[in-house]
Image (tube, rainbow, N blue to C red):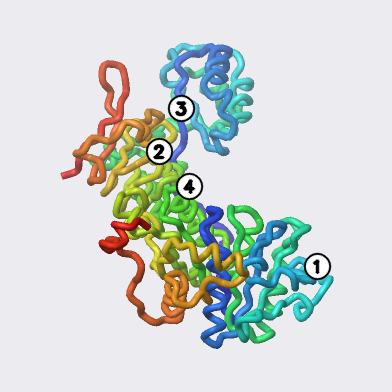
Amino acid sequence: MSKIVVVTSGKGGVGKTTTSASFAAGLALKGFKTVVIDFDVGLRNLDLIMGCERRVVYDFINVIHQEANLNQALIKDKQCEGLYVLAASQTRDKDALSEEGVERVLNDLAGMGFDYIVCDSPAGIEAGALMAMHYADEALVVTNPEVSSVRDSDRILGMLSSKTRRAIEGREAIKEHLLITRYNPNRVQEGQMLSLQDIQDILRIPLIGVIPESETVLQASNQGLPAVHMQGTEVSEAYKDVIERFLGQERPLRFVDAQKPSLLKRLFGR
Amino acid sequence: MSFELKSTHWPLLALALRSADTQRLMQDWQQRYGDAAGFFDQDALLLDFSALSDSEPALADLSALLALLRAAHLQPVAYRGGSAAVRQQAAAAGLARADDALDAVQALTASATSTTLEPTPSTPTPAPERLAVGALLIDRPLRSGQQVYARGRDLIVTAMVNPGAEVVADGHIHIYAPLRGKAIAGARGDENACIFATCLEAELLSIAGTYRTSEVPLPPEVRSKAARVRLQRHNDAERLLIEAIA
């Protein structure tokens, strides 16, 4: 029975696609057959972040409209065994999505034996975002430590508990996880950014992890590599912790304390 | 038996007429509620003629007044008080006689001192029930963008009300958690409605139309503390009084 996990936020640019890519890759590295789907029709990015933009022939919309089947549209990842990408259309827009079409594709994917189906949601609260969350079993709510992101995440949480199939049919609620991204402990200490506790006080959902602000993310996307593959970096380690916690393991929170730069660093800058 | 007839209670809106001049009534209504499309939602209405003279002749244009009220999505269903001519006119217009309709405050006092109303022989004796309807109880947090409206009753919320959320009630509002959104009590004019919160940090507080935003910060004795908000009349002006709950 496959689990559908939506990566959503409300606010744009907080790290949904970065997270979807690393989360899906991380699960595949653990041996789970995983597919990651881009729901941002018309503004697709997932294929770029996954490094498979040159191999997109058929996309999610083609499959929904039965112009192609899943075997033709699914792109096998080159880094990870068991990881597949279903890209969005670049020429259409969100009106090309339909509830029945999305449901059929998700059921077909479950039938193909996928353990996890990760849905990369677009920003906003329109059809694309609603469609991405509609069939979810679990949700990663990606939030930056900044007021507008927290407000938007709160709105999205409201929608997860009222506009999804589980909510409408009165079934068990979607399991919500808070993922804080672009966290900079030094700026938190200086009072420029919201702290973990501030964010949790407003959103009040379990924290699954904190991804520190890092130049690694940009390097990774330029290379078309999910950040989790950048071995030894803080971002990679933080995403690996998230995967472990998602799978039920305990991991202490890392990269959340302000570092006092060493004497050398302070003398010579950076 | 295929049906059962029993006594039931339901709060009504009452329109107390202070003038018999229907033209003026309609003009004043337009001025006050003309722009508020969708304010009423097929609410049942009682026309209260008690303030008019005992010898008042039939009203000049009652049917036009009723039509205006219906156009505003109110449903005139009953009347009380008025001279014989006015009462006859109202009955002819299809309104039910509701002379023992009590105002909400009177009703509670009556039941407290346990005076019983003489039931008219044709109606079944009402069972002794609470007059006020129970509060609407919400146990889940209200997130940004969500709204709750407790129509005709009080509202109790036991989880946080986040910034961007709105809680509205015709009666009192009680929040047993941080109140950070908008709270609007006495939404249809009840000036006795209050707002209670265990942690008051509201964006906006309103009672019967008198409101206060968070632009002027709450005083430290009540900010983020257990507090009660009520409407106070002070030299003909109304203002919100916010007090800490000990």
Marks 1 and 4 on same chain: no
Say whether marks 3 and 4 touch (CB < 8 Å): no
Cα distance between the residues tagged 3 and 2: 30 Å
Residue at the image point whose x is 71% and y is 77% from the top: A75
Marks 3 and 1 on same chain: no
Residue at the image point whose x is 65% and y is 58% from the top: A128
Marks 2 and 1 on same chain: no
Quick check: B134 above or below B12?
below
Cα distance between the residues tagged 2 and 4: 11 Å
Where is residue B118 shown, x and y percent of the image?
35, 38
Where is residue B192 shown, x and y percent of the image?
31, 33
The residue labelled by disc 4 is: B147
Is tag 3's residue or tag 2's residue first in the polypeptide sequence?
3
Chain on which label 3 sits: B
The residue labelled by disc 1 is: A65
Chain on which label 2 sits: B
Query: Looking at the image, can residue A91 be seen?
Result: yes
Is tag 3's residue or tag 4's residue first in the polypeptide sequence?
3
**SS at mark 1 in the image:** loop
Residue at the image point whose x is 66% and y is 79% from the top: A77
- Comparing marks 3 and 4, which lies closer to the viewer? 4
The label number, if any, that marks residue B184 in the structure image: 2
Q: Nearer the viewer, residue A230 or A242?
A: A230
Cα distance between the residues tagged 3 and 4: 36 Å
The label number, if any, that marks residue A268 in the structure image: none
